[in-house]
Amino acid sequence: MFRYLFSRFECENTPRNFQKEIKIMENHGDHSHLQQRKKRRLVLFPLPLQGHINPMLQLASILYHKAGFSITIIHTNFNSPNSSNYPHFSFRSIPDGLSETEASTADIIAFDMLLNVKCAVPFQDCLAELLGGGGGDDDVACLITDAVWYFTQAVADSLKLPRIVLRTSNVCSFNAFAAIPLLYEKGCLPMQDFQFETPVLEIPPLRYKDIPIIETHDPENLNRFLKDMVKQTKVSSGIIWNSFQELDELAMTNLKQEFPIPNFPIGPFHKYFPASSSSLLAQDQTSISWLHKQPPKSVIYVSFGSITGVNETEFQEIAWGLANSKLPFLWVVRPGLVCGTEWLEPLPKNFLEMLDGRGQIVKWAPQQEVLAHSSVGVFWTHNGWNSTLESICEGVPMICQPCFGDQLVNARYVCDVWRFGLRLEKKVERGEIERAIRRVILEAEGQKMRERIMILKDKMDTCLKTGGSSYQSLESLINYIMSF
C-alpha cells in the first residue's frame, strides 16, 4: 500500500501569490473600525509541513485583507516560507534544532513530538520579545497556532495571551482523532485484522480500518501525542476550521459536546482569493496549456500530495491503469514519489512514446487551477484535506486512495456519506484502476456523483457570500478577536 514520507522542501520557487493587494471588504465596518484593527497584531505559528503551511498563510491573508489586522508569522528554519511573497507580513524565524536525520524521518508522530520539545524555548523567547515591544507599535491581540503545536498553550498561558487553534483538517477527522485515546482505554485498539470492516460505534460512519492511525516506531507515542493535542485544544480560546458549516454540520454538533469553546468554520480558505497558493514546490504551468487541448470532463488528474509515496510496483500499476483507460491524464509525479528514484526511471520502457500525447506528467501542478479547468473529469487523490476541499469547491468527483491519518476519514466521507467518490479498496492494481476511472468518467454512476458534488459546490459558493455561514463565522471571529 501507499506509504508516507516527508523531506525538506526549499521555498525559493514559491509562486507569487498575495502580492497584489486585495481590497478590504467594505461591509466589515467603517474606516475607524478598520484603523482600530490595524493597531491590533496577530501572531501566527504554522506547522512546517506543506498541508499545514498553506492554510495558515491563507488564514493570515484573510485576517489581513478582510479585517485589517497586522500579522506576524513565527516559523521554524525547517521548511520556512518565502517571506518575500508576503511583504505585508512580519516574519520571525526560530531555530528548530533538527538534525538532517531528524528532518527527513518518515515517523511523522515522532517528528511532531520532537518539534514540540525543541521549539518550546525558542518560541517562548520570540513571543516574549514580540510582547515586550520587539514587534512594533501594534498591540498583540492573540496567538493563532496549528493544533499540533500543543506546547504553545502553556506558553500563551504564561504570557497571559489568548491562544486560538487552527485545525487544518475538517471536523469529522478531528472527532476521529479525539476518539482514539478512548478506544485504546476500551481495549478496542490496537485493532486486529478481523475488526477492519467492523463499524466504530463511537465515531460513525467509520469502520475500524478508517480510524486515522498513524504509524510510529512506538505505538504509545500516538496515544500520548493525541492526548496532548486534544487536551490543549480543549483549553484553548477557540478553534478555527478550514471547512464550512454545511459540509461539517453533524460533526460540528457532536464536537461541541466535547469542546464547548467557540468554533469558527470560515472555510474554504483558498476561495477568498483567486488561485492563491503557498506551495513549497515549483508549479509546472505547462499542465494548464495541455489541459486546454483536452475535451470537457475527460481528463484524469492524479496527485498524491507532498508526503505520500509509492513503491516501484505500485508506480507501474498506476502507469498501466492510466494508459489502459484510453483517456487523457495529467499525473503529478513528485521527485522522490518512488523511494530510491530521482523521478521517472521506474516507468515502463517507451511508456511516454506509447501514449502519443494522451498523458502529461509533471513534477508539481497548480492544483487549484487544474481542478477548476473544464477538461478535468475526476481527481485521483490521497484525500488530504486541502486536496479534498479543493475538489469539492470545483465540483470534481474523486477516486480515493488514502494513505494514513485524516485521509482515511476523508475518503470514507467522500465515498459513503457525501457519495461523490470511489475508493480503491484493494491493492493498487491496473485492472481495478482502469475500471474505477471508466466508472467515474464514462458511466451513469459518475454522472450522479457529479450531480451530488455540484449541489455541495453550490452550497460552498453561497456560504462565502454576504449572510452565508462562513461569512457570518468570519464576522464572529473578527469580533471575538477584537474583544481580547
Image (cartoon, grey):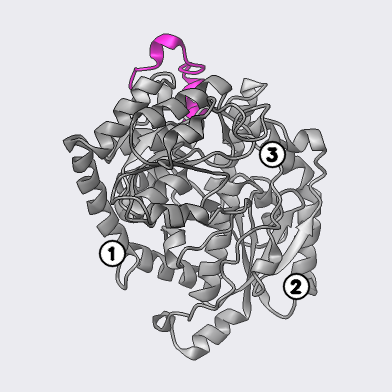
Name the residue nearer the viewer: 215 or 438: 438
What residue does disc 1 label? Answer: 462
Please name the amino acid that badge 3 sits on.
Ser
Res. 443 image quadrant? top left
What residue does disc 2 label? Answer: 135
Task: Say whether disc 1 or disc 3 marks the residue closer to the N-terminus.
Answer: 3
Please name the amino acid that badge 1 sits on.
Thr
The CA span between labels 2 and 3 is 31 Å
Q: Is residue 177 visible?
A: no
Q: Report the residue at 76% width, 47% height from top.
A: 119
Residue 454 is left or right of residue 484, and the answer is left
* SS state under label 1: helix
Q: Is residue 18 visible?
A: yes
What residue does disc 3 label? Answer: 7
Dot 1 alpha-carbon crowd within 10 angstroms: few under 14, some 14 to 19, many 20 or more = some
Residue 172 is left or right of residue 395, and the answer is right
Residue 36 is left or right of residue 155, and the answer is left
Counting from the top left corner in percent of width and height, residue 371 is at 39, 52
In the image, the segment drawn in magenta is: 178-199
